[in-house]
Structure formats: structure tokens, C-alpha cells
Amino acid sequence: MSNSPAKLRAPLKLARGLGSAKFGAEHWWSMRITSVALVILTIWFVGGVIGHLGADHAQFVAWLKSPICAAMMALTAAVTFHHAEHGLQVVIEDYVHCEALKIAALLANKLVNYGLAAACVISVVKVSLGA
Amino acid sequence: MALSILHRASGVALSVGTLLLTAWLVAAAVGPEAFAKVQGFIGSPLGLLMLFGWTFALFYHLSAGIRHLVWDAGYGFDLPSAEKGAYIVIGASLILTVATWVVGLSVW
């Protein structure tokens, strides 16, 4: 019994890689940083939207052409989609238990969120550079 | 307890709402006709309903998120504080939603 290979391995060796903890601390900290950033960005964004309800294209473009506005809008989009991707990741991990389906959902989550983020940032850049 | 799942639900709702944000910005980049179409949709009854729901989800998620940050800093874990926090979150999200719409509709 005592000379079976499993017994010669340290318990840590047997447990490593099998738990749920993979990038937990990094994920947790990233959500805190982005949430603090989003408190500021969201308040700016809501103010900006209220100021441009029913605005026509020319008025909206004139607003978004200012470098500060363009930077704030690009940051709002980038941080929002990063935060959304991380948040939805937890929801998927909590509710999707089939491993293959879970991986597919997590990949789709990244694709959609980072795709939308890219679309928003490129649109802001295009408007702000006046194309 | 109920507020905890509502934080998650509002987060998912906000994620869906980002499609509207993307449509708005992409339309602005495409041109005046596309932008007018999106602004027209936002001004329609369905668009206004979506925007109202999105506003409430946003302010709820914002308030509850700040409550989570306070907990993360190690404060407010006792029951009376937790209960008080819950009422502050509900009150703040309702007041901010109504205030935003009062200001928004008056400048529209």
C-alpha cells in the first residue's frame, strides 16, 4: 500500500489544476478597478446623452469631435465592454455546467463584447477625425 | 438577498443595452441618415421604454456596485447596516432614474 505511486505524490500535486481557482484574484481585482472607473465614466456618459437627446447628426458630431469627448466616449465603451465581458463570464460559469457548452459560451462572450468594443472605438475615432 | 440577484440581472440587462450604445455610435460614424434612423428608434415608444429600463438598470447597478465596493473595503457587514444599505440603494436608484428623466424630457 505504502509504495503505490499515488502515495508518493504530494497532495498538492494531485490537487493542482483541478480546482476552480484559475485567475480568480486577477478577475476580482479587474472588476473593482473597472467599476470605480465606470462610476466616473457613467456619470459623464449620462450627462452627455441627456445633452444630445434628439440631436441631429451635425450637432452630435460637433460634440464628439472634441478630443476630450472622444477620449471619454472611447474609454466609456472600452471599460464598459471589458466589465461586461468579465461579469457575463461569471454568469456563464455559474449557470452553464456542460463543459463544451461553457467554453463555447465563454468564447462567444469574448467575441461579441470585444467586437462591439472595437466597433464603438473605431466609430468614435472616425467621427472625431472627421471622416 | 433579492438585491443580490437583481445586481446580476441588471448587469445582464445592461450588457444587452450596450447594443443600443453600439448602434448609436456606429450610426454616427456611418452618416446622417443612419444616425437619424437610430435617433428615431430611440424616440419611439419602444425605444423610450428600453431607454427607461436601461436607465433604471444602470442606476441600480451603479448604486449596488458602490455598496459592493463599500463591503470590499470591509464596512457595513452587520445586519442593521446591510439593511440600511439596501434601502439606500433602492432609494438612490429610483431618485436618480426619475431625476434623469425629468431633466432629459425637459431639455428634449
Image: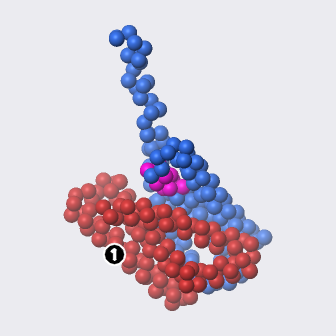
Q: Is residue B90 above or below residue A81?
A: below
- Residue at (45% x, 33% y) in the render: A18
Q: Is residue A60 visible?
A: no
Numbered range of the magenta stretch: A85-94
- Residue at (51% x, 43% y) in the render: A99
User: What shade does chain A have?
Assistant: blue
Residue B87: quarter of image: bottom left
- Residue at (43% x, 64% y) in the render: B9
- Residue at (65% x, 65% y) in the render: A120
Q: Where does the image place residue B98, in percent across and percent down from the top left?
A: 42, 82
The amino acid type, in three-letter code, at marker 1 is Gly
* Residue position marked by numbered label 1 in the rendering: B91
Name the quarter where the C terminus of chain B is drawn.
bottom right
The single residue placed furthest to the top in the displayed view is: A3
Q: Where does the image place residue B39, in percent across and percent down from the top left?
A: 64, 81
Report the chain shown in red.
Answer: B
Dominant secondary structure of the residues highlighted in magenta in the image: helix
Judging from the image, mark 1 belongs to the subunit labelled B
Q: Where does the image place residue B76, in percent across and percent down from the top left?
A: 27, 59
Q: Is residue A36 above or below residue B35?
A: above
Say left or right for B18 vs B3. Answer: right
Q: Is residue A123 visible?
A: yes
Q: Where does the image place residue A42, in percent across and percent down from the top left?
A: 51, 68
